[in-house]
Structures are given as structure tokens and as C-alpha cells.
Image (cartoon, rainbow, N blue to C red):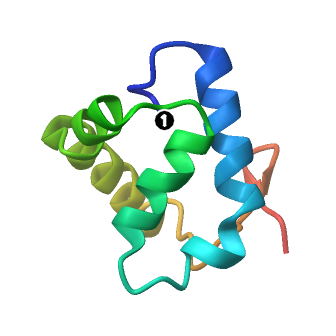
């Protein structure tokens, strides 16, 4: 999402992504399904390809995920914090 060109495009993509979550999350070719959803959300194929192949973004996302598991002890999603403390 960070690599999309503007906030309006990001919002359209996120809306399309969540609206179709029950479909794409269970596809055998999730990447192709996400590319279709990206188009619905206003993201052209070239932008989608560039975003999904960005290794710096991938590394940052994986590092954030690992930090959440190792340091914050996040064990599932969604996981909520209130005033810095996990909501139980």
C-alpha cells in the first residue's frame, strides 16, 4: 500500500481488498486475484507489479512482523494495544 501513488488510490485499493477478502484469501493463485482487485481499486498492472516486487518493502514488512512477534508478543491478528498494553 505504501508504494501506491496517493492517498485516494490507497483508500480505493484497501476498500476493494477488504470488500473481496472472502474471495482472494482462498484463491490458489492469490497474486493474480490481488492484481485483479488492484485494478478494481484503481491500481494499474505496472504499478501493482512494481509494488509487489519491491524487495525493500518486503524486507521492511517482514522485519515489522518479526518485531511484533518477538518484542510485542503478538500471537495472532487482529491484535490490539490500548495505552501500549495488549488488550485481553
Residue 4 falls in which quadrant of the image? Answer: top left
Image spot of residue 65 (x, y percent): 40, 59
Residue 41 falls in which quadrant of the image? Answer: top right
Q: Residue at x 56, y 52 (%)?
A: 37
| Observer-nearest of 38 and 67 | 38
Looking at this view, name the residue that lies furthest to the top.
Answer: 6
Horizontally, residue 79 falls left or right of residue 63, namely right
Label 1: which secondary element:
loop
Q: Is residue 11 above or below residue 41?
A: above
| Observer-nearest of 66 and 5 | 5
Image spot of residue 49 (x, y percent): 25, 41
Label 1 CA crowd tier, 10 Å (few <14, some 14–19, many 20+): some
Total marks in image: 1
Horizontally, residue 57 falls left or right of residue 71, namely left
| Observer-nearest of 82 and 52 | 52
Q: Quadrant of the C terminus?
A: bottom right
User: Is residue 56 at least partly visible in the picture?
Assistant: yes
Horizontally, residue 50 falls left or right of residue 72, namely left
| Mark 1 lies on residue | 1
Q: Residue at x 21, y 47 (%)?
A: 59
Image spot of residue 57 (x, y percent): 27, 38
Image spot of residue 7 (x, y percent): 63, 16
User: Is residue 70 at least partly visible in the picture?
Assistant: no
Q: Is residue 81 above or below residue 3?
A: below
Q: Is residue 77 above or below residue 44?
A: below
Q: Residue at x 25, y 48 (%)?
A: 58
Amino acid at each position: 500500500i505504501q508504494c501506491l501513488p496517493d492517498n485516494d488510490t490507497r483508500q480505493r485499493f484497501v476498500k476493494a481488498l477488504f470488500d473481496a477478502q472472502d474471495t482472494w484469501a482462498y484463491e490458489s493463485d492469490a497474486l493474480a486475484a490481488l492484481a485483479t482487485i488492484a485494478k478494481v481499486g484503481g491500481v494499474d498492472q505496472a504499478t501493482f507489479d512494481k509494488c509487489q516486487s519491491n524487495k525493500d518493502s518486503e524486507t521492511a514488512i517482514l522485519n515489522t512482523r518479526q518485531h511484533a512477534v518477538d518484542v510485542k508478543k503478538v500471537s495472532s491478528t487482529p491484535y490490539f494495544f490500548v495505552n501500549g498494553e495488549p488488550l485481553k
